[in-house]
Image: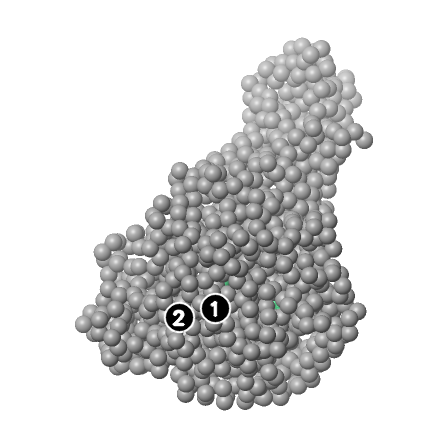
């Protein structure tokens, strides 16, 4: 199939950047979206140009590196998948496809479609963990976890840190990401002791990074490749209110 | 600053803290609206019921009640506005370069125009207060209950106030946007306060819509009914002040 | 033997089961107040590197950690699906440290070091405790206790798992611990930073040269020791189940600086992957092996039928039973579709080589659920494999409930790696190697769910105890980047980058990688022969020459340039492929993942006649090859130097692996 691509090109972080048009010719329907870009890139290189840069690694939907906004929707309109899992058979011959980076002030562009998502790492560093010194753990089965809590915690833990939630939110809010981590750890008995500290720390870092606020529109949930529920945001709101109250009275 | 003050300050400056303020003040305003609409519907019970109600409000707790309520609502409204405006500004700043190809997957239209519906409601509320509470129109201010001339004729004021089609139109726009605001806002309160989950999200959303629609019907039934003449003729207000000669 | 003397594996004395305990009791310690004076470089943030960096920082050392991804959380360990083994015996089904040890040794076809493997089995239990305490959400039973499953044909249920995301959950646990230490200041993290050379000062590894991938800046880092946990080299085959960025660069640069590369020919091919669909294909996707529990593998009996299927004129469903060849069931009646990984992989290749492959490329066999669906119903099949079927459908566009799946083997794991002793130290003093990057625990074949276990054992428990034995001998901070060796190495790195940038040829990096991959897959893949390997060794230099004269790298070196990154990796893969073929040629036996067609059981063999094994099964030659082949670098294009570490089996008896 033949396609027209409208791709965001930006030489460097300080460059202004603009949309450029490319023709993708003879793309096999079985190819993945990223393989389609590989084909286009090979042509660009051979023709003497600079290939379109984009992040990717595992190409099987788990590492969270790939991060393209396809026709205005992070990871494309298809539910529950990452960019690398999008296949060309979902497009039609002659389509025009817009390809843009995950846009947010807290995800500055490095080059073209590659962004810097280190803000997520800093949020995790601010409380997204359970402190346990290696070797000091008790026997794993001495800590039974209620089946429902374990499942809910697991669902939240499925987050791959891709940032689609931020990219889809009109406010570039990171609440789904933060909520998922808080829910994953707060729901477990192991996570209980540091619960308040965790929530306060992560939310403060999230704010400091310049993410927007949640306005409960749930676009994040709609694009999340792991289909994490916005229930985790409600829980984060509650946990934050409790933690802030406890902090105030103490 | 003491530690409580510091904590409050941090709460206000955090995204979730501000959101909680928006939700709590929004909820207060909704409760007020619910009471308000029920009270207003008394117009359909006739002049006496309406005017009794208005008198009761004025004399509640020896006259302090209404001021407590007014100040409370004003504070809530101001907090709501300050918080939302500041959130909206932060949100705009959070995405410095916008997408060239814009697309939404599931966000409702109402949820995307909250600030505009809110600001229109603000304009409407100011107008409405000037109209019926402050009564800048002295004609409306000087109406007297025919049965009890010592008290204000609130019923007559409402009927008189809705004679102008432009006023009614503004009410329709204002209330409609208020209800759009609430169609998203009410369900949102549950989420912001942490009372939403997959199981109850559906009912909560329906509740939000139900309240919004009931408020819409309730509030708009009055101007529309007046326009259609269901509440009878308006009192002759101009006669009362400027042209006493023609008074009955 | 090398100038460094013979390969001393530094195995502690004493009975096998007590070695590790005794070692720890007598191990050297570093005074707590001194620990922060030591600088340690960790390259890699996967399970092995991440756990090592976090733990060493907790202990008080100063750690610098490097990875090429934008975040340490994206290391390829994230992709592991199946699970992690541990000898917890929570199921009370007779598991024990000894059993896990024995299974691992046997699974490795008796080509691994007993002492290391036993230690691995011992610490396996601590790993689970550690991970659960960190909040890793392993699957649980209704009662709230941890669930287990049996994996990869093990007779006990010792595999812990988190749905199909075990690697992800373990890595996130480890990443969180790492981030905590980063915030505390114990670890400085360098993401999007690639190690391009190892720096040796007075014969010891004392630092690295790296390139900041976003700015292109080349710089040096000095430390008291270097830990490498840079993963496996499966991408030498171009197509594999590894992430696109997985590479051999770090290991190979260390090799060039004197570190021995052990058993590079041991590679594992996984039988159930989604087949290649065309030239543009960039990677292969693994489908869980559990599919073989209910799916039946077949190809048509006749080449003509297969051709019709390939051309789309016939669908698999239309082939009547009598025209189908359920070849695994036919050849291995007792194991059938559950025959071991290497056997199933090779049989698929044979069928396709005969012209009976069914995918459009000719490389694919059917995995058919028709009978299982008829027997158990679609719902049961959906509950067992729903997510896998969905994944398959997303990639292939076919509905496996309606028509048979197609699968083909793919490169999945590499057992070979840098040679290390019991302390996980390379022959190059100061260089320690962990995880898939070392060679130590899996012999010639790795058991399912054991790589995660090894990576975490190395990082959380082994290196923190063994590193002091090296550190105790050095003065902390004695080497800085002022040493002339750093300037020298940096200059060499810059020169190489300039050279790559200046070729300005006509071919893309990928085109070379693809060419190399096809060659090694063909000659040094599932089945190897002397002839084929020699041919490969002849062809690789030509690829190298073409690469260095005709590759085209666009853009500039002083900013993000992914083609330049790839070029550096492919250049090393080319050199490494040669090393791999040398090793495969040298090892004139078949064992585990290394199958030499000349060395297989035939109907004449006694073991076959007695019914103990089948013909076609890998045939080891223990008398000649019971050693680790550790290769020393001799120069570009030169045959490397072989150093042998003889393997002594004190506790287990070498036997023929039988699956009958
Ligand atoms: C699809 C798949 C499924 C698997 N399933 C299982 C399973 O179920 N059970 C099991 O036990 N094992 C499984 N494995 C194997 C297992 O996942 C890996 O062997 C293991 O995770 C490797 O961990 P590691 O820490 O050694 O390396 P990796 O996780 O690969 O980490 C390598 C690190 O090194 C860094 N790095 C590499 N080169 C450089 C360089 N030059 N400069 C700087 N940094 C560098 C990378 O950035 C990365 O951080 C699977 C493997 C695959 C591919
Ligand atoms: C009677 C008047 C009003 C009522 C009953 C009301 C009610 C609400 C409610 C319930 C919410 C949802 C809170 C949440 O997200 O949890 C909300 C949100 C909002 N309100 Fe109002 N509101 C009123 C007036 C206003 C006014 C005058 C403004 C003008 C600035 C305004 C602006 C907003 C905005 C921008 C939001 C969205 C905030 C967000 O979602 O984060 N509202 N309102
Ligand atoms: S490349 Fe890893 S999730 Fe897409």
- Helix, strand or loop at label 1? It is loop
- Residue lying furthest left in this view? C322
Whether ligand 1 has any atom under 8 Å from the Cβ at mark 1 is answered as no
Give the vertical position of C133 relative to A49 (above or below).
above
Q: Position of residue A209 (x, y in %)?
A: 70, 50
Chain of the residue under the numbered disc 2 shown in the image: C
Q: Is residue C473 visible?
A: yes
Residue B210 image position (x, y, % from top left): 51, 33
Q: Residue furthest right?
A: B1
Which mark is drawn over residue C592? Answer: 2
Farthest residue, direction front: C14
Real-space CA distance between mark 2 and mark 1, rounded to the nearest whole angstrom: 10 Å
Residue at 63%, 41% in the rendered image: A198
Viewer can see residue C80: no
Which residue lies at the image location 53% right of the left edge and 53% below the top edge? C22
Image x and y of residue B193, in percent: 59, 34
Q: Find numbered disc 2 in the image and state the secondary structure of the residue it sits on.
A: loop
Q: Tell me what residue is drawn at x 70 percent, y 40 percent.
A: B14
Quarter assignment of residue C606: bottom left
* B60 over A164 or under it: above or below: above
**Is C149 in front, or is C244?**
C149
Tell which of C315 and C460 is nearer to you.
C460
Q: Is residue A52 above or below residue C98?
A: below
Q: In the rendered structure, find residue C415 and report the number of the disc placed on it.
A: 1
Q: Quadrant of residue A29?
A: bottom left
Position of C320 with respect to C344 (left or right) is left
Marks 1 and 2: in contact by CB < 8 Å?
Answer: yes
> Circle 2: is it few (<14), some (14-19), or many (20+) Cα within 10 Å?
many
| Residue C556 falls in image quadrant | bottom right
- For ligand 1, tell me if the residue under mark 2 lies within 8 Å: no
> Which numbered disc flags the more N-terminal residue, 2 or 1?
1
Check the picture and name the quadrant holding the C terminus of chain C.
Answer: bottom left
């Amino acid at each position: 199939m033949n396609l027209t691509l409208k791709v965001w090109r930006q030489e460097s972080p300080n460059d202004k950047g603009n949309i450029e048009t490319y023709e993708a010719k003879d793309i096999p329907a079985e190819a993945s979206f990223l393989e389609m870009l590989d084909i286009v890139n090979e042509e660009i290189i051979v023709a003497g140009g600079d290939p379109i840069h984009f992040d990717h690694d595992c190409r099987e939907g788990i590492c969270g590196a790939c991060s393209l906004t396809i026709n205005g929707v992070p990871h494309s309109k298809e539910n529950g998948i990452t960019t690398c899992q999008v296949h060309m058979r979902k497009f039609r011959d002659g389509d025009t496809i817009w390809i843009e980076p995950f846009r947010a002030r807290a995800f500055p562009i490095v080059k073209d479609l590659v962004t810097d998502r280190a803000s997520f790492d800093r949020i995790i560093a601010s409380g997204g963990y359970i402190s346990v010194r290696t070797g000091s753990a008790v026997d794993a089965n001495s800590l039974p976890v209620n089946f429902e809590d374990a499942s809910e915690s697991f669902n939240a833990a499925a987050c791959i840190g891709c940032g689609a939630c931020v990219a889809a939110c009109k406010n570039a809010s990171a609440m789904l990401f933060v909520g998922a981590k808080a829910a994953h750890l707060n729901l477990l008995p192991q996570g209980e002791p540091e619960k308040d500290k965790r929530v306060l720390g992560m939310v403060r870092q999230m704010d400091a990074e310049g993410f927007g606020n949640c306005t409960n529109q749930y676009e994040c949930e709609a694009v999340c490749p792991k289909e994490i529920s916005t229930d985790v945001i409600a829980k984060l709101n509650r946990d934050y209110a409790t933690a802030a109250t406890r902090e105030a009275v103490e | 600053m003491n530690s409580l003050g510091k904590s409050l300050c941090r709460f206000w400056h955090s995204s979730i803290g501000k959101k909680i303020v928006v939700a709590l003040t929004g909820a207060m305003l909704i409760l007020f609206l619910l009471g308000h609409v029920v009270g207003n519907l008394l117009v359909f019970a006739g002049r006496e019921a309406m005017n009794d109600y208005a008198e009761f409000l004025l004399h509640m707790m020896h006259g302090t009640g209404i001021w407590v309520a007014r100040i409370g609502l004003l504070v809530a409204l101001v907090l709501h506005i300050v918080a939302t405006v500041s959130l909206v500004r932060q949100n705009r700043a959070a995405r410095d370069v916008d997408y060239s190809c814009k697309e939404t997957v599931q966000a409702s239209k109402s949820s995307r125009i909250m600030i505009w519906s809110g600001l229109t409601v603000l304009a409407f509320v100011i107008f409405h207060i000037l109209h019926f509470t402050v009564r800048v129109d002295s004609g409306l201010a000087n109406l007297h209950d025919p049965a009890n001339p010592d008290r204000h004729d609130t019923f007559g004021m409402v009927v008189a106030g809705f004679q102008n089609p432009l006023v009614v139109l503004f009410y329709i726009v204002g209330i409609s946007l208020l209800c759009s605001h609430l169609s998203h806002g009410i369900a949102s309160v549950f989420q912001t306060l942490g009372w939403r989950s997959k199981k109850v999200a559906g009912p909560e959303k329906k509740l939000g819509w139900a309240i919004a629609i009931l408020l819409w019907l309730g509030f708009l039934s009055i101007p529309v009914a007046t326009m259609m003449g269901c509440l009878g003729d308006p009192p002759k207000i101009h006669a009362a002040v400027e042209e006493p000669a023609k008074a009955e | 033997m090398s100038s460094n003397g013979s390969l001393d594996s530094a195995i502690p004395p004493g009975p096998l089961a007590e070695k590790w305990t005794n070692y720890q009791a007598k191990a050297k310690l570093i005074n707590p107040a001194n620990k922060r004076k030591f600088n340690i470089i960790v390259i890699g943030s996967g399970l092995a590197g991440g756990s090592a960096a976090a733990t060493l920082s907790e202990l008080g050392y100063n750690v610098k950690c490097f990875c090429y991804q934008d975040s340490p959380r994206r290391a390829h360990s994230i992709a592991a699906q199946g699970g992690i083994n541990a000898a917890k015996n929570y199921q009370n089904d007779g598991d024990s440290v000894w059993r896990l040890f024995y299974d691992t040794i046997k699974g490795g076809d008796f080509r691994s070091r007993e002492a290391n493997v036993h230690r691995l089995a011992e610490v396996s239990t601590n790993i689970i405790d550690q991970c659960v305490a960190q909040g890793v959400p392993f699957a649980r039973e209704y009662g709230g206790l941890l669930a287990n499953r049996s994996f990869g044909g093990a007779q006990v249920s010792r595999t812990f798992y988190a749905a199909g995301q075990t690697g992800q959950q373990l890595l996130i646990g480890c990443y969180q611990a790492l981030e905590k230490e980063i915030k505390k200041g114990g670890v400085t993290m360098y993401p999007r930073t690639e190690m391009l050379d190892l720096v040796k000062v007075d014969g010891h590894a004392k630092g690295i040269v790296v390139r900041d991938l976003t700015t292109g800046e080349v710089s040096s880092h000095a430390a008291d020791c270097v830990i490498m946990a840079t993963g496996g080299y499966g991408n030498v085959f171009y197509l594999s189940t590894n992430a696109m960025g997985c590479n051999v660069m770090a290991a190979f640069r260390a090799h060039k600086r004197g570190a021995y590369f052990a058993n590079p020919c041991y590679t594992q091919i996984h039988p159930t992957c989604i087949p290649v669909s065309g030239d543009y294909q960039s990677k292969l996707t693994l489908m869980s092996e559990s599919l073989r529990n209910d799916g039946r593998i077949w190809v048509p009996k006749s080449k003509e039928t297969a051709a019709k299927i390939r051309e789309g004129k016939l669908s698999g469903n239309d082939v009547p039973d009598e025209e189908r060849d359920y070849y695994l069931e036919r050849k291995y009646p007792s194991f059938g579709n559950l025959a071991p990984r290497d056997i199933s992989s090779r049989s698929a290749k044979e069928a396709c080589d005969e012209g009976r492959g069914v995918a459009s490329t000719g490389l694919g066999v059917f995995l058919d659920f028709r009978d299982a669906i008829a027997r158990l119903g679609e719902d049961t099949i959906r509950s067992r494999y729903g997510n896998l079927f969905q994944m398959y459908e997303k990639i292939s566009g076919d509905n496996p409930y309606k028509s048979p799946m197609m699968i083909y083997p793919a490169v999945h794991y590499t057992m070979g790696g840098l040679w290390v002793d019991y302390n996980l130290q390379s022959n190059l003093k100061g260089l320690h190697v962990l995880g898939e990057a070392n060679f130590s625990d899996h012999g010639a074949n790795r058991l399912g769910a054991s790589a995660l276990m090894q990576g975490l054992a190395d990082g959380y428990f082994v290196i923190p105890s063994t590193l002091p034995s090296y550190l105790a001998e050095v003065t902390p901070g004695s080497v800085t980047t002022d040493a002339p060796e750093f300037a020298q190495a940096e200059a060499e790195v810059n020169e190489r980058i300039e050279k790559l940038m200046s070729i300005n040829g006509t071919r893309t990096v990928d085109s070379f990688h693809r060419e190399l991959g096809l060659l090694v897959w063909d000659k040094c893949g599932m089945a190897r022969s002397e002839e084929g390997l020699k041919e490969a060794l002849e062809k690789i230099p030509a690829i190298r020459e073409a690469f260095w004269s005709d590759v085209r790298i666009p853009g500039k070196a002083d900013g993000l340039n992914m083609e330049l990154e790839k070029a550096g990796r492919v250049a090393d893969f080319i050199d490494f492929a040669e090393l791999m073929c040398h090793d495969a040629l040298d090892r004139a036996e078949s064992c585990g993942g290394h199958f030499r067609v000349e060395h297989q059981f035939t109907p004449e063999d006694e073991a076959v006649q007695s019914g103990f094994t089948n013909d076609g099964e890998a045939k080891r030659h223990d008398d000649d090859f019971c050693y680790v082949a550790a290769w020393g670098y001799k120069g570009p294009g030169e045959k490397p130097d072989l150093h042998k570490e003889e393997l002594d089996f004190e506790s287990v008896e070498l036997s023929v692996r039988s699956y009958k």
